[in-house]
Protein backbone atom coordinates (compact mmCIF):
# COMPACT_ATOMS: atom_id res chain seq x y z
CA UNK A 1 0.00 0.00 0.00
CA UNK A 2 1.37 3.39 -0.85
CA UNK A 3 1.80 5.80 1.98
CA UNK A 4 -1.44 7.65 2.51
CA UNK A 5 -1.53 11.39 2.49
CA UNK A 6 -3.35 13.03 5.36
CA UNK A 7 -6.36 14.95 4.11
CA UNK A 8 -5.82 18.66 4.11
CA UNK A 9 -8.93 20.44 5.45
CA UNK A 10 -8.37 23.16 2.88
CA UNK A 11 -8.43 20.55 0.15
CA UNK A 12 -12.19 20.25 0.07
CA UNK A 13 -13.49 20.39 -3.45
CA UNK A 14 -17.01 21.16 -4.35
CA UNK A 15 -18.37 20.84 -7.83
CA UNK A 16 -18.00 24.61 -8.10
CA UNK A 17 -14.38 24.50 -6.92
CA UNK A 18 -13.61 21.73 -9.34
CA UNK A 19 -15.07 23.54 -12.29
CA UNK A 20 -13.44 26.84 -11.44
CA UNK A 21 -9.73 27.39 -11.46
CA UNK A 22 -7.30 28.07 -14.19
CA UNK A 23 -8.37 29.15 -17.66
CA UNK A 24 -8.45 26.48 -20.34
CA UNK A 25 -5.18 27.65 -21.81
CA UNK A 26 -3.34 26.86 -18.59
CA UNK A 27 -1.07 23.88 -19.08
CA UNK A 28 -1.93 21.00 -16.83
CA UNK A 29 0.07 17.96 -15.94
CA UNK A 30 -0.59 15.25 -18.42
CA UNK A 31 0.49 13.35 -21.48
CA UNK A 32 1.27 15.53 -24.44
CA UNK A 33 -1.54 15.33 -26.93
CA UNK A 34 -4.39 13.23 -25.66
CA UNK A 35 -4.55 11.81 -22.21
CA UNK A 36 -2.42 11.24 -19.19
CA UNK A 37 1.10 10.12 -18.58
CA UNK A 38 1.91 6.74 -17.18
CA UNK A 39 1.66 6.83 -13.42
CA UNK A 40 4.86 7.17 -11.43
CA UNK A 41 6.02 4.03 -9.67
CA UNK A 42 4.10 3.51 -6.43
CA UNK A 43 5.66 4.05 -3.02
CA UNK A 44 6.71 0.90 -1.17
CA UNK A 45 3.92 -1.06 0.41
CA UNK A 46 3.33 -0.48 4.09
CA UNK A 47 0.99 -3.38 4.64
CA UNK A 48 -2.73 -3.64 5.37
CA UNK A 49 -5.25 -5.39 3.18
CA UNK A 50 -8.10 -2.90 3.07
CA UNK A 51 -6.33 -0.81 0.47
CA UNK A 52 -3.70 -3.33 -0.50
CA UNK A 53 -2.44 -2.96 -4.02
CA UNK A 54 -1.86 -6.51 -5.16
CA UNK A 55 0.08 -5.38 -8.15
CA UNK A 56 3.50 -6.09 -9.50
CA UNK A 57 6.02 -3.77 -7.84
CA UNK A 58 7.27 -2.69 -11.27
CA UNK A 59 3.90 -1.59 -12.64
CA UNK A 60 2.30 1.57 -11.32
CA UNK A 61 -1.46 1.43 -10.80
CA UNK A 62 -3.45 3.40 -13.36
CA UNK A 63 -5.95 4.58 -10.74
CA UNK A 64 -4.78 5.55 -7.27
CA UNK A 65 -7.35 6.79 -4.77
CA UNK A 66 -5.85 8.35 -1.68
CA UNK A 67 -8.06 9.02 1.35
CA UNK A 68 -11.02 9.82 -0.87
CA UNK A 69 -14.14 10.91 0.99
CA UNK A 70 -17.39 11.88 -0.69
CA UNK A 71 -20.05 13.92 1.08
CA UNK A 72 -23.65 14.56 0.16
CA UNK A 73 -24.20 17.65 2.27
CA UNK A 74 -23.15 16.53 5.75
CA UNK A 75 -23.47 12.83 4.99
CA UNK A 76 -20.12 11.13 4.45
CA UNK A 77 -21.05 8.49 1.88
CA UNK A 78 -17.43 7.46 1.21
CA UNK A 79 -14.98 7.47 4.11
CA UNK A 80 -11.30 7.96 3.34
CA UNK A 81 -11.03 5.22 0.75
CA UNK A 82 -7.60 4.40 -0.64
CA UNK A 83 -7.26 1.88 -3.43
CA UNK A 84 -4.88 1.11 -6.29
CA UNK A 85 -6.25 -0.23 -9.58
CA UNK A 86 -3.74 -1.64 -12.05
CA UNK A 87 -4.02 -1.04 -15.76
CA UNK A 88 -5.61 -3.78 -17.88
CA UNK A 89 -7.45 -5.33 -15.00
CA UNK A 90 -11.09 -5.76 -14.07
CA UNK A 91 -12.00 -4.60 -10.59
CA UNK A 92 -15.42 -5.27 -9.08
CA UNK A 93 -16.99 -3.20 -6.31
CA UNK A 94 -19.34 -5.24 -4.17
CA UNK A 95 -21.28 -4.59 -0.98
CA UNK A 96 -24.83 -4.14 0.23
CA UNK A 97 -27.08 -1.52 -1.32
CA UNK A 98 -26.30 2.00 -0.13
CA UNK A 99 -22.72 1.24 0.93
CA UNK A 100 -21.26 3.75 -1.54
CA UNK A 101 -20.18 1.64 -4.53
CA UNK A 102 -21.74 3.90 -7.17
CA UNK A 103 -20.66 7.03 -5.35
CA UNK A 104 -17.05 5.89 -5.35
CA UNK A 105 -17.25 4.77 -8.98
CA UNK A 106 -18.59 8.18 -9.98
CA UNK A 107 -15.81 9.92 -8.07
CA UNK A 108 -13.28 8.41 -10.49
CA UNK A 109 -14.54 10.52 -13.41
CA UNK A 110 -16.03 13.36 -11.35
CA UNK A 111 -19.57 12.54 -12.26
CA UNK A 112 -20.48 13.51 -8.69
CA UNK A 113 -19.67 17.09 -9.68
CA UNK A 114 -23.09 17.17 -11.27
CA UNK A 115 -24.85 16.52 -7.94
CA UNK A 116 -25.59 19.71 -5.99
CA UNK A 117 -24.09 19.64 -2.50
CA UNK A 118 -21.71 16.80 -3.29
CA UNK A 119 -18.04 17.35 -2.43
CA UNK A 120 -14.95 15.22 -2.58
CA UNK A 121 -11.80 15.29 -0.48
CA UNK A 122 -8.56 13.38 -0.90
CA UNK A 123 -6.79 12.53 -4.13
CA UNK A 124 -7.97 10.60 -7.15
CA UNK A 125 -5.00 10.00 -9.40
CA UNK A 126 -5.36 8.62 -12.90
CA UNK A 127 -2.07 8.07 -14.66
CA UNK A 128 -0.48 10.05 -11.83
CA UNK A 129 -2.65 13.14 -12.45
CA UNK A 130 -5.20 14.27 -9.87
CA UNK A 131 -8.52 14.36 -11.69
CA UNK A 132 -9.76 16.94 -9.14
CA UNK A 133 -6.97 19.35 -10.00
CA UNK A 134 -8.77 22.59 -10.91
CA UNK A 135 -6.73 22.65 -14.09
CA UNK A 136 -8.12 19.27 -15.14
CA UNK A 137 -9.63 19.50 -18.59
CA UNK A 138 -13.06 17.92 -18.29
CA UNK A 139 -13.33 17.05 -21.97
CA UNK A 140 -10.15 14.99 -21.72
CA UNK A 141 -11.35 13.41 -18.51
CA UNK A 142 -14.67 12.28 -19.96
CA UNK A 143 -13.01 11.08 -23.13
CA UNK A 144 -10.47 8.98 -21.28
CA UNK A 145 -12.91 7.52 -18.77
CA UNK A 146 -16.00 6.02 -20.39
CA UNK A 147 -19.11 5.20 -18.43
CA UNK A 148 -21.71 2.50 -18.97
CA UNK A 149 -24.88 2.80 -16.93
CA UNK A 150 -27.11 0.22 -15.34
CA UNK A 151 -29.93 0.74 -17.82
CA UNK A 152 -28.92 0.77 -21.48
CA UNK A 153 -29.34 4.36 -22.66
CA UNK A 154 -28.76 4.57 -26.40
CA UNK A 155 -29.52 7.92 -27.98
CA UNK A 156 -32.69 7.98 -30.10
CA UNK A 157 -30.52 7.88 -33.21
CA UNK A 158 -29.30 5.22 -35.57
CA UNK A 159 -26.86 2.54 -34.43
CA UNK A 160 -24.16 4.19 -36.53
CA UNK A 161 -24.84 7.66 -35.16
CA UNK A 162 -24.72 6.41 -31.57
CA UNK A 163 -21.16 5.18 -32.04
CA UNK A 164 -20.12 8.13 -34.21
CA UNK A 165 -21.49 10.66 -31.71
CA UNK A 166 -18.35 11.06 -29.56
CA UNK A 167 -15.86 11.05 -32.46
CA UNK A 168 -17.97 13.69 -34.28
CA UNK A 169 -17.80 15.89 -31.18
CA UNK A 170 -14.04 15.46 -31.34
CA UNK A 171 -14.09 16.78 -34.91
CA UNK A 172 -13.99 13.51 -36.85
CA UNK A 173 -16.55 14.14 -39.59
CA UNK A 174 -15.45 12.30 -42.73
CA UNK A 175 -17.21 9.03 -43.51
CA UNK A 176 -13.89 7.60 -44.59
CA UNK A 177 -12.64 8.08 -41.01
CA UNK A 178 -15.88 7.33 -39.20
CA UNK A 179 -16.85 4.13 -41.02
CA UNK A 180 -13.85 2.06 -39.91
CA UNK A 181 -14.01 3.54 -36.42
CA UNK A 182 -17.69 2.64 -36.02
CA UNK A 183 -17.04 -0.88 -37.31
CA UNK A 184 -14.06 -1.34 -35.03
CA UNK A 185 -16.01 -0.28 -31.94
CA UNK A 186 -18.99 -2.45 -32.81
CA UNK A 187 -16.64 -5.40 -33.33
CA UNK A 188 -14.88 -4.79 -30.02
CA UNK A 189 -18.26 -4.65 -28.31
CA UNK A 190 -19.20 -7.96 -29.96
CA UNK A 191 -22.23 -6.57 -31.73
CA UNK A 192 -20.98 -6.02 -35.28
CA UNK A 193 -22.46 -9.19 -36.71
CA UNK A 194 -25.88 -8.36 -35.31
CA UNK A 195 -25.87 -4.76 -36.55
CA UNK A 196 -23.80 -4.56 -39.73
CA UNK A 197 -26.89 -4.84 -41.95
CA UNK A 198 -28.94 -2.31 -39.99
CA UNK A 199 -26.44 0.37 -39.06
CA UNK A 200 -28.78 3.16 -40.08
CA UNK A 201 -31.81 1.84 -38.24
CA UNK A 202 -32.79 3.18 -34.84
CA UNK A 203 -30.79 1.89 -31.89
CA UNK A 204 -34.04 1.78 -29.95
CA UNK A 205 -35.07 -1.24 -32.04
CA UNK A 206 -32.33 -3.38 -30.50
CA UNK A 207 -32.94 -5.72 -27.58
CA UNK A 208 -31.86 -4.62 -24.11
CA UNK A 209 -28.70 -6.72 -24.24
CA UNK A 210 -27.84 -5.44 -27.71
CA UNK A 211 -28.45 -1.88 -26.56
CA UNK A 212 -26.04 -2.35 -23.68
CA UNK A 213 -23.34 -3.68 -26.02
CA UNK A 214 -24.03 -0.70 -28.30
CA UNK A 215 -23.54 1.59 -25.30
CA UNK A 216 -20.21 -0.12 -24.67
CA UNK A 217 -19.29 0.43 -28.34
CA UNK A 218 -20.28 4.08 -27.97
CA UNK A 219 -18.08 4.38 -24.87
CA UNK A 220 -15.16 2.81 -26.74
CA UNK A 221 -15.47 5.27 -29.62
CA UNK A 222 -13.68 8.07 -27.78
CA UNK A 223 -10.74 5.71 -27.18
CA UNK A 224 -10.88 5.70 -23.39
CA UNK A 225 -8.30 4.06 -21.16
CA UNK A 226 -10.83 3.27 -18.46
CA UNK A 227 -14.38 1.98 -18.59
CA UNK A 228 -16.58 2.47 -15.55
CA UNK A 229 -19.62 0.23 -15.45
CA UNK A 230 -22.38 0.68 -12.92
CA UNK A 231 -24.23 -2.62 -12.65
CA UNK A 232 -24.11 -3.07 -16.43
CA UNK A 233 -26.07 -6.32 -16.42
CA UNK A 234 -28.69 -5.74 -13.79
CA UNK A 235 -31.37 -4.92 -16.37
CA UNK A 236 -30.48 -7.86 -18.62
CA UNK A 237 -31.54 -11.49 -18.91
CA UNK A 238 -29.01 -14.28 -18.21
CA UNK A 239 -28.03 -14.78 -21.86
CA UNK A 240 -27.42 -11.07 -22.45
CA UNK A 241 -25.58 -10.95 -19.13
CA UNK A 242 -23.30 -13.76 -20.22
CA UNK A 243 -22.47 -11.91 -23.44
CA UNK A 244 -21.53 -8.76 -21.54
CA UNK A 245 -19.42 -10.78 -19.09
CA UNK A 246 -17.58 -12.46 -21.97
CA UNK A 247 -17.09 -9.06 -23.54
CA UNK A 248 -15.60 -7.61 -20.35
CA UNK A 249 -13.13 -10.47 -20.21
CA UNK A 250 -12.00 -9.68 -23.76
CA UNK A 251 -11.83 -5.92 -23.28
CA UNK A 252 -9.40 -5.93 -20.39
CA UNK A 253 -6.41 -6.50 -22.66
CA UNK A 254 -7.01 -2.99 -24.00
CA UNK A 255 -8.86 -1.22 -21.20
CA UNK A 256 -9.04 -0.99 -17.44
CA UNK A 257 -12.52 -1.82 -16.22
CA UNK A 258 -14.07 -0.88 -12.91
CA UNK A 259 -17.55 -2.23 -12.32
CA UNK A 260 -20.17 -2.09 -9.64
CA UNK A 261 -22.12 -5.28 -9.29
CA UNK A 262 -24.64 -6.55 -6.79
CA UNK A 263 -24.10 -10.02 -8.21
CA UNK A 264 -21.31 -11.79 -6.36
CA UNK A 265 -21.14 -14.65 -8.85
CA UNK A 266 -20.56 -12.07 -11.54
CA UNK A 267 -17.75 -10.44 -9.55
CA UNK A 268 -16.21 -13.87 -9.06
CA UNK A 269 -16.54 -14.71 -12.77
CA UNK A 270 -15.24 -11.56 -14.40
CA UNK A 271 -13.02 -9.60 -12.03
CA UNK A 272 -9.34 -9.91 -11.18
CA UNK A 273 -9.71 -7.93 -7.98
CA UNK A 274 -12.66 -7.22 -5.76
CA UNK A 275 -13.29 -4.37 -3.35
CA UNK A 276 -15.84 -4.94 -0.61
CA UNK A 277 -17.52 -1.77 0.66
CA UNK A 278 -19.64 -1.47 3.76
CA UNK A 279 -21.24 1.70 5.13
CA UNK A 280 -19.00 3.91 3.03
CA UNK A 281 -15.74 2.24 4.02
CA UNK A 282 -13.56 -0.01 1.94
CA UNK A 283 -13.41 -3.06 4.14
CA UNK A 284 -11.21 -5.28 2.01
CA UNK A 285 -9.58 -5.17 -1.41
CA UNK A 286 -7.71 -8.11 -2.79
CA UNK A 287 -7.49 -10.61 -5.57
CA UNK A 288 -10.99 -11.87 -6.31
CA UNK A 289 -10.02 -15.45 -5.52
CA UNK A 290 -8.85 -14.34 -2.06
CA UNK A 291 -11.97 -12.30 -1.37
CA UNK A 292 -14.24 -15.22 -2.20
CA UNK A 293 -12.25 -18.10 -0.74
CA UNK A 294 -10.01 -16.67 1.93
CA UNK A 295 -11.08 -13.19 2.99
CA UNK A 296 -9.09 -11.68 5.82
CA UNK A 297 -11.98 -9.73 7.27
CA UNK A 298 -14.94 -11.27 9.07
CA UNK A 299 -17.41 -8.79 7.54
CA UNK A 300 -16.21 -9.69 4.06
CA UNK A 301 -16.57 -13.35 4.90
CA UNK A 302 -20.09 -12.83 6.23
CA UNK A 303 -21.07 -10.89 3.11
CA UNK A 304 -19.65 -13.23 0.49
CA UNK A 305 -21.14 -16.24 2.27
CA UNK A 306 -24.55 -14.58 2.25
CA UNK A 307 -24.87 -13.99 5.99
CA UNK A 308 -25.95 -10.40 5.42
CA UNK A 309 -26.62 -7.92 2.66
P1 LIG B 1 -24.54 1.81 -3.61
O1 LIG B 1 -24.07 2.09 -4.99
O2 LIG B 1 -23.61 0.95 -2.83
O3 LIG B 1 -25.95 1.27 -3.57
P2 LIG B 1 -24.69 4.68 -3.35
O4 LIG B 1 -23.36 5.16 -3.75
O5 LIG B 1 -25.78 4.78 -4.36
O6 LIG B 1 -24.56 3.19 -2.81
O7 LIG B 1 -25.16 5.46 -2.05
C1 LIG B 1 -24.31 5.62 -0.93
C2 LIG B 1 -24.99 6.57 0.06
O8 LIG B 1 -25.06 7.87 -0.52
C3 LIG B 1 -26.40 6.17 0.43
O9 LIG B 1 -26.62 6.52 1.79
C4 LIG B 1 -27.24 7.02 -0.49
O10 LIG B 1 -28.50 7.29 0.09
C5 LIG B 1 -26.42 8.30 -0.59
N1 LIG B 1 -26.60 8.96 -1.89
C6 LIG B 1 -26.36 8.43 -3.11
N2 LIG B 1 -26.63 9.32 -4.08
C7 LIG B 1 -27.04 10.45 -3.45
C8 LIG B 1 -27.47 11.75 -3.89
N3 LIG B 1 -27.52 12.06 -5.18
N4 LIG B 1 -27.83 12.64 -2.94
C9 LIG B 1 -27.78 12.34 -1.63
N5 LIG B 1 -27.37 11.16 -1.14
C10 LIG B 1 -27.02 10.21 -2.03
Image: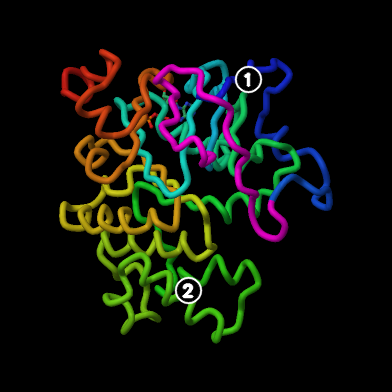
> Residue 271: where, in percent of width, then height?
31, 42
Where 102 falls versus 173 (above or below)? Answer: above
**Of label 2 and label 1, which has the lower sequence position?**
1
Q: Secondary structure at mark 1?
A: loop
Left of 94 or right of it: where is 182? right
**Residue drawn at (47%, 80%), measured in percent from left and top?**
180
Cα–Cα gap, marks 2 and 1:
44 Å
Where 54 falls versus 283 (above or below)? Answer: below
> Residue 256: where, in percent of width, then height?
44, 49
Quadrant containing the C terminus is top left
Q: Is residue 40 magenta?
A: yes
> Residue 236: where, in percent of width, then height?
23, 52
Q: Residues within 10 Å of mark 2 (few under 14, many from 20)?
A: many
Q: Would residue 216 be seen by someone viewing this image from the given angle?
A: yes
Front-lying residue, 89 or 223: 89
**Residue drawn at (57%, 53%), measured in percent from left and top?**
144
Q: Would residue 70 be seen by someone viewing this image from the given angle?
A: no
Q: Is residue 169 magenta?
A: no
Identify the main secondary structure in magenta: loop
Q: Residue furthest top?
A: 298
Left of 264 or right of it: where is 162? right
**Residue drawn at (32%, 54%), measured in percent from left and top?**
248
Q: State the extent of the magenta-drawn residues as a range.
A: 31-60
> Residue 2: where, in percent of width, then height?
55, 25
> Which of the 4 quarters of the picture holds residue 292?
top left
Q: Nearer the viewer, mark 2 or mark 1?
A: 1
Q: Which residue is mark 2?
A: 161
Q: Which residue is mark 1?
A: 5
Q: Secondary structure at mark 2?
A: helix
Front-lying residue, 39 or 180: 39
- The picture quadrant for ligand 1 comes to top left
**Residue drawn at (35%, 55%), measured in percent from left and top?**
152
Amino acid sequence: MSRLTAPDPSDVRTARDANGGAPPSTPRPGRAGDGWPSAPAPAPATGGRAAAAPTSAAVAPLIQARNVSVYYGRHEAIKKVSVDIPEHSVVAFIGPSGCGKSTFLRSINRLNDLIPGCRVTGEMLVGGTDVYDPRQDMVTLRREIGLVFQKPNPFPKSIYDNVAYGPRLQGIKRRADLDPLVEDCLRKAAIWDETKDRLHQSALGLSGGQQQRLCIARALATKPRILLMDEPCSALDPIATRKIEDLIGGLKSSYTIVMVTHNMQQAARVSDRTAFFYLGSLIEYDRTSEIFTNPSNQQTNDYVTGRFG
